[in-house]
């Protein structure tokens, strides 16, 4: 390779760089001229999409909330057995602890009463038994029911599913 070929390669690279720089300068100029033509006000990058809340949209507020006791009275333990799969990854029904404490006999059992399981302070400080309504509130949103709990489950939103799952757990005891 001689010096003339090397000079051509370097010149081509410099020429390409110059074309890219001029393109960037032209794009910047066009953008700023477009922004300045709209006046002195500040413009956000993007559009805000306004969304009505559930109450304004006529969503959840139109439906009366059914008390848990009524839903629980009509709950199906058979349907709850299918929902147990979500819990089975961390809990057992054979009396042995896993990531979470065993749940056999949980309905009516005192909070934080399983021997050999290290409960979080949030659950250990709650007194009283696990009534069906208490379990429902807990599995709806564990972090809200007991802030600081070790349970990482995100929650079960459907009240019928919670009632069915609790009916299944109660049928085992």
Image (tube, rainbow, N blue to C red):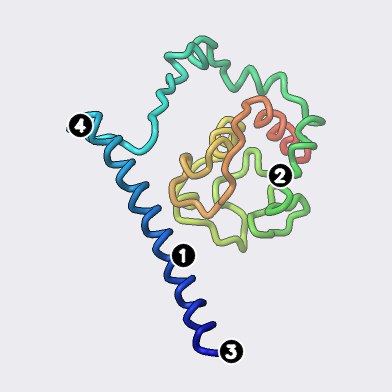
How far, Cα to Cα, is label 1 from label 2?
Answer: 59 Å
Task: Tell me which numbered mark, 1 or 2, is placed earlier along the sequence.
Answer: 1
How far, Cα to Cα, is label 2 from label 4?
Answer: 53 Å
Dot 4 falls on a residue whose secondary structure is loop
Dot 2 falls on a residue whose secondary structure is helix
Along the horizontal axis of the image, is 161 left or right of 81?
left
Residue assigned mark 1: 16
| Residue name at image x 57 percent, y 43 percent | 154
Instruction: Kindly check if marks 1 and 2 are in contact, taking CB atoms under 8 A apart as contact.
Output: no
Instruction: Kindly check if marks 1 and 3 are in contact, taking CB atoms under 8 A apart as contact.
Output: no
Q: Is residue 151 above or below residue 156?
A: below
> Which residue is most to the bottom?
2
Residue assigned mark 2: 86
| Residue name at image x 55 percent, y 35 percent | 134
Which quadrant would residue 72 be assigned to in this image?
Answer: top right
| Residue name at image x 55 percent, y 46 percent | 111
Residue assigned mark 3: 1
Q: Is residue 78 above or below residue 146?
A: above
Task: Tell me which numbered mark, 1 or 4, is placed earlier along the sequence.
Answer: 1
Q: Position of residue 15 (x, y in %)?
A: 43, 66
| Residue name at image x 42 percent, y 70 percent | 14
Q: Position of residue 4 (x, y in %)?
A: 50, 84
Q: Position of residue 137 (x, y in %)?
A: 54, 34
Along the horizontal axis of the image, is 45 left or right of 71?
left
Q: Is residue 12 above or below residue 170?
A: below
Task: Tell me which numbered mark, 2 or 4, is placed earlier along the sequence.
Answer: 4
How far, Cα to Cα, is label 1 from label 3?
Answer: 22 Å
Q: Which mark is residue 41?
A: 4
Q: Can you tell which of label 1 and label 2 is closer to the viewer?
A: 1
């Amino acid at each position: 390779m001689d010096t003339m070929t090397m000079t051509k390669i370097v010149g081509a690279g410099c020429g390409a760089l110059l074309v890219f720089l001029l393109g960037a300068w032209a794009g910047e100029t066009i953008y700023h001229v477009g922004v300045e033509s709209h006046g002195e006000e500040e413009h956000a990058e993007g559009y805000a999409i306004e969304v009505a809340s559930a109450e304004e949209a006529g969503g959840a507020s139109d439906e009366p909330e059914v008390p848990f006791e009524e839903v629980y009275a009509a709950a199906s333990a058979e349907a709850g057995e299918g929902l147990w799969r979500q819990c089975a990854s961390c809990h057992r029904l054979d009396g042995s602890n896993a990531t979470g404490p065993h749940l056999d006999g949980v309905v009516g059992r005192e909070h934080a009463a399983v021997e050999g399981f290290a409960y979080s302070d949030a659950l250990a400080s709650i007194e009283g038994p696990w009534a069906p309504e208490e379990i429902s509130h807990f599995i709806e949103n564990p972090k809200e029911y007991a802030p600081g709990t070790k349970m990482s489950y995100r929650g079960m939103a459907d009240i019928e599913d919670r009632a069915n799952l609790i009916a299944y757990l109660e049928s085992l005891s």
